[in-house]
């Protein structure tokens, strides 16, 4: 996994949004090793996957129970997985199905975690966005309810009014550029 993401960050494809300082910090973190939650519970690498409907100008967003924030779906990369493998596994675990996965992520963020109930202090997030039709996107709410107190389609304006998490705000801003 580290080589995969390191190459993407070094090549900085046009579709990837990443600030230069964060790009360097991300590469440094990859080079340090132990980038999964099992290996390093303090900081680790995650995948985020955000469905949006470009026609309705809506996003599929929820209130995450553990984080107590409005965020998109996502999860930790496990030991031995590539980002793409984690993306597929996490979609299956959270939605009950997978969508065709892009080869290049479209955003990279870092999330500071300041929660005394958690040992984790930060997530390096790799973002993937999925253009879908709201009426055709049917995730398994039984699975989603394990991690989200509420989740569903909301307008971009509604998202702007409830999201306080900086990486999620960047995810919404990125979606706006894809419309």
Image (cartoon, grey):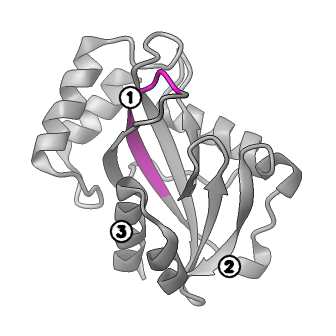
Residue most extreme to the bottom:
55
Could you give the CA–CA distance between mark 3 and mark 2, rounded to whole angstroms? 18 Å
Give the image location of residue 23, x and y in percent. Answer: 18, 40
Please name the residue that numbered disc 2 is placed on: 133
- Give the mark, 3 or 2, whose residue is nearer the N terminus: 2
Could you give the CA–CA distance between mark 2 and mark 1, rounded to whole angstroms? 35 Å
> Dot 3: few (<14), some (14–19), or many (≥20) neighbours within 10 Å?
some
Residue range corresponding to the magenta coloring = 118-128
Please name the residue that numbered disc 3 is placed on: 174
- Give the mark, 1 or 3, whose residue is nearer the N terminus: 1
- Is disc 1 placed on a helix, strand or loop? loop
Q: Quadrant of the rendered structure where residue 15 is?
A: bottom left
Q: Residue at x 67, y 36 (%)?
A: 89
Q: Are marks 2 and 1 in contact (CB under 8 Å)?
A: no
Q: Residue at x 63, y 40 (%)?
A: 66
- Give the mark, 2 or 1, whose residue is nearer the N terminus: 1
Residue most extreme to the front:
116
Give the image location of residue 156, x and y in percent. Answer: 50, 81
Depicted 142 relative to depicted 174: above or below: above
Going by the image, does 66 lie left or right of 113? right
Camera-near label (3 vs 2) is 3
> Dot 1: few (<14), some (14–19), or many (≥20) neighbours within 10 Å?
some
Please name the residue that numbered disc 1 is placed on: 121
């Amino acid at each position: 996994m580290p080589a995969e993401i390191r190459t993407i960050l070094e090549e900085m494809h046009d579709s990837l949004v990443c600030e230069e300082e964060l790009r360097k910090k991300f590469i440094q973190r990859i080079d340090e090793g132990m980038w999964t939650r099992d290996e390093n519970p303090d900081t680790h690498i995650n995948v985020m996957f955000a469905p949006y409907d470009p026609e309705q100008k809506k996003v599929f967003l929820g209130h995450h129970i553990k984080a107590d924030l409005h965020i998109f779906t996502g999860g930790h990369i496990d030991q031995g997985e590539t980002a793409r493998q984690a993306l597929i596994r996490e979609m299956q675990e959270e939605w009950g199905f997978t969508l065709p996965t892009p080869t290049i992520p479209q955003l990279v963020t870092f999330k500071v975690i300041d929660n005394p109930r958690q040992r984790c202090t930060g997530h390096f997030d790799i973002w993937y966005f999925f253009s879908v039709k709201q009426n055709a996107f049917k995730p398994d709410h039984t699975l989603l309810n394990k991690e989200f107190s509420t989740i569903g389609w909301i307008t971009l304006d509604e998202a702007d009014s409830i999201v306080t998490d900086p990486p999620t705000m960047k995810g919404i801003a990125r979606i706006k550029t894809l419309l």
